[in-house]
Image (spheres, helix red, strand yellow):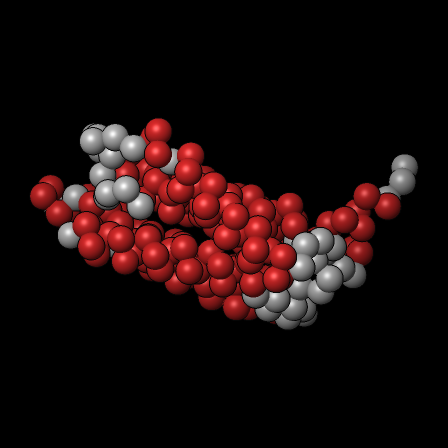
Amino acid sequence: METFIDVLIILLVLTNFRLLGSSRISACIQTTALQAIILSAFPIALHTDALGFHLILLSGATIVVKAIVLPWLLRKTLREINISREVEPLMGYTASIIIGAALLGLCLLISEPLQSTHILGGRMLIPGALFTILSGLFLIISRRKALTQVIGYLVLENGIYAFGAALAVEEPLVVEMGVLLDVFVAVFVMGITIHHISRDFDHIDTDRLSLLKD
């Protein structure tokens, strides 16, 4: 089973690199949905000895909310604001991948002291979750479009989800359902905000908002 978990972590890491190197927002939305499908297998893979209805419910809720509902909201917003690419991001895509590789190495290094026999999923889960969190943060600070920053927030939450699946041994369902609810509300509010920004200013470049003066 640890081999299967390692495969899931590798796939999760590869999706992070695809996000860092992709210029098309529609591809980024598709990748976040793929991440959600990968993450939905985590609770079952990590708790095969205690597989029950609540874990199946958690995996199902992950797919419904993170792989179907949230990507649908993002695609709807993408159609309404009529953009397809992230133009001139603050950090180029090649540089983003290079920085991502450096962040992955850093995560492998700093995760060593965090390893514990109480952590499920083997030695790759913690660095994979850390790398997902840092990838989300990097997308938030290195991209101009507000919609891409929302995607970065989703990736950040995916990393937190992976941590929760590994560390919340006693009550994983309570922890993860709370996170799912928070991210659903946050993305819903962000979608409304992006729509109003696009309607009032004809763009969603957050760096241009700094030009506004009282």
- Camera-nearest residue between 202 and 139: 139
Residue that appears at 42% across and 60% down: 14
Query: Can residue 180 be seen here?
Result: no
* 44 w.r.t. 22: above or below: above
Q: Where is residue 204 in the image (x, y as percent from the top left)?
A: 72, 56
Residue that appears at 40% across and 42% down: 108
Query: Can residue 210 be seen here?
Result: yes
- Camera-nearest residue between 88 and 207: 88
How many callouts does the rendering have? 0
- Camera-nearest residue between 65 and 24: 24
Q: Position of residue 4 (x, y in %)?
A: 21, 56
Q: Position of residue 52 (x, y in %)?
A: 13, 45
* 176 w.r.t. 97: above or below: above
Residue that appears at 63% across and 57% down: 95
Residue that appears at 21% across and 30% down: 118
Q: In this view, does 28 lie to the left or right of 1?
A: right
Q: Where is residue 73 in the image (x, y as percent from the top left)?
A: 51, 59
Q: In what quadrant of the picture does the C terminus appear?
A: top right
Kindly give the residue lying farthest to the left in the view shown. Answer: 49
